[in-house]
Image: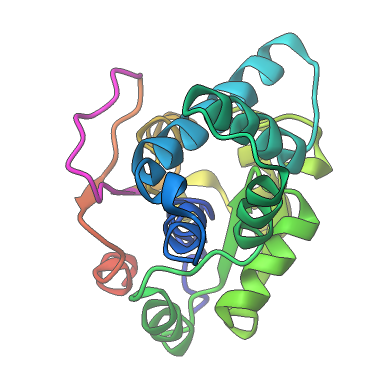
Amino acid sequence: MTKIPCVFDAYGTLFDVAASARQAADEPGQEALARTWQPLAADWRTKQLEYTWLRAVTGDHADFWQVTQDGLDWAMERHGLSAPELRARLLALYRELAAYPEVPKMLRALKAAGHPCAILSNGSPGMLADAVASAGVGDLLDAVLSVEDVGVFKPARVVYDMVGARFGTAPGDVLFVSSNGWDVCCGAAYGFRTAWVNRSGLPLDRLPGRPDHVIPDLTAIPEIAA
């Protein structure tokens, strides 16, 4: 019998979105960034997401790479950082974000148990290809689905529709995993089985759907999917 597909958000779920700023801050000559990398990384991520939601509402779509650059520009200005070389370095590192430590073992366990595995992400195809290659997990994924195929960001329902189109499954026959509370709640409302990777111990978003599982990292996903 075919096992249920396990579908993962990418940024913040499989890949550590703070890794770019953290790594750059440790490099020689980056003392100014070292003093402020944590709030900069947080602001970068917040603006990146806000811009996806606003563009989805207005219909003014741009790919995730553009949104990522726009979010960084806002965050750098807020924190008084303007060096073009720093901007270029942060963006280069974002193309090769580290996966969270448990990711390879977790994906191998799912594949060994017969579960198809996929990414469903706001990321543009080029960004996702770079991240997957950098993390060395390409052979563990059956599909990498980008919103660029439908031209609107999550949580638009047409994005979640991509999973059924790819795997021929009803929503209730898919385990959807995200670290974004809004994403997992919207996925639950769509009908997915869901797991929220709540690494920071955040409150649940006040949205119609509720996750079936709340976990601190991805270690338990093979057991949840079984």
Place of residue 129 in the rendered image (x, y in percent of width and height, measured from the top left)? 73, 67
Nearer the observer, 44 or 59: 44
Q: Is 203 in the magenta?
A: yes
Question: Residue at horizontal 80%, vertical 24%?
Answer: 61
Nearer the observer, 88 or 30: 30
Q: Quadrant of residue 97?
A: bottom right
Nearer the observer, 150 or 129: 129
Question: Residue at horizontal 64%, vertical 30%?
Answer: 73
Q: Is 31 in the magenta?
A: no
**Quadrant showing the C terminus:** bottom left
Extreme residue toward the top, this view = 58
Extreme residue toward the bottom, this view = 112
Is there any visible trace of residue 94 in the rendered image? yes
Label tally: 0
> In the rendered view, would you say 163 is above or below 140?
above
Which secondary structure class fits the magenta region best? Answer: loop
Instruction: Indicate left or right for 126 with 192 as reference.
Output: right
Place of residue 57 in the rendered image (x, y in percent of width and height, measured from the top left)? 67, 12
| Span shown in magenta | 195-207
Is there any visible trace of residue 49 in the rendered image? no
> In the rendered view, would you say 177 is above or below 57?
below
> In the rendered view, would you say 103 is above or below 63?
below
> In the rendered view, would you say 72 is above or below 19?
above
According to the image, what is the colour scheme of the structure?
rainbow
Place of residue 6 in the rendered image (x, y in percent of width and height, measured from the top left)? 48, 63
Place of residue 105 in the rendered image (x, y in percent of width and height, measured from the top left)? 37, 84
Question: Residue at horizontal 48%, vertical 52%?
Answer: 21
Question: Residue at horizontal 49%, vertical 55%?
Answer: 30
Instruction: Indicate left or right for 101 with 192 as reference.
Output: left
